[in-house]
């Protein structure tokens, strides 16, 4: 992807096993997608914990912006990670790696999968 390209459609499950589709937001909301390699890894945990308090400044009130974290972990892992660290935004599971590849975020390294 390059700047100006239309974002590829995606349909992923969040930590509650609810489907989230880009088409539900396109033209209605701005999305911030936070790609990260792995739940519970030290660096990713620190990043999510530092983003959390700032997210309300971006998404609070009448904001038209929604934030999603994205990686290849399963929804049950996202649910535990989000609960343990109080992450205030949904985490999406791209277990088949279609989205991370479409968005140019696939590292090709197991188990880290997203760059």
Image (cartoon, rainbow, N blue to C red):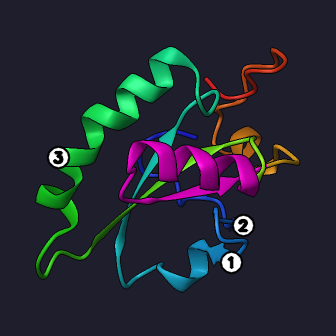
Which disc number belongs to residue 54? 3
Helix, strand or loop at label 3? It is: helix
Task: Give SS at disc 1.
Answer: loop
Write down the residue under mark 2: 13
What are the residue bounds of the magenta stretch?
75-94
Residue 52, placed above or below residue 111: below
Q: Where is residue 101 in the image (x, y as percent from the top left)?
A: 75, 39
Distance, label 1 to label 2, CA atoms, is 5 Å
Which residue, as the protein is rendered here, is positioned at the far right?
A: 96
Earlier-in-chain disc, 1 versus 2: 2
Estimate the x, y position of residue 43 in percent, counting from the top left: 46, 16
In x, y percent, where is residue 74?
Answer: 78, 49
| Residue tagged 1 | 18
Real-space CA distance between mark 1 and mark 3, rounded to the nearest whole angstrom:
25 Å
Q: Nearest the camera: 6 or 88?
A: 88
* Residue drawn at the location 72% of the way across and 20% of the way down: 107
Return the x and y of residue 71 as percentages of the image width and height.
66, 41
The residue depicted at 73 percent of the width and 56 percent of the height is 75
The answer to whether 100 appears left or right of 97 in the picture is left
Of mark 3 and mark 2, the one earlier in the sequence is 2
The answer to whether 11 appears left or right of 56 in the picture is: right
Q: Quadrant of residue 28?
A: bottom left
């Amino acid at each position: 992807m390059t700047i100006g390209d239309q974002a590829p459609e995606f349909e992923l499950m969040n930590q509650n096993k609810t489907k989230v589709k880009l088409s539900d937001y396109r033209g209605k909301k701005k999305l911030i997608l936070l790609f990260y390699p792995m739940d519970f890894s030290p660096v990713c945990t620190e990043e999510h914990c530092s983003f959390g308090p700032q997210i309300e400044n971006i998404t609070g009130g009448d904001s038209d912006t929604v934030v999603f974290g994205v990686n290849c972990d399963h929804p049950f892992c996202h649910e535990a990670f989000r609960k343990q660290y109080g992450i205030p935004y949904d985490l999406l599971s791209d277990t088949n790696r279609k989205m991370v590849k479409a968005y140019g975020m696939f590292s090709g390294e197991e188990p880290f999968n997203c760059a």
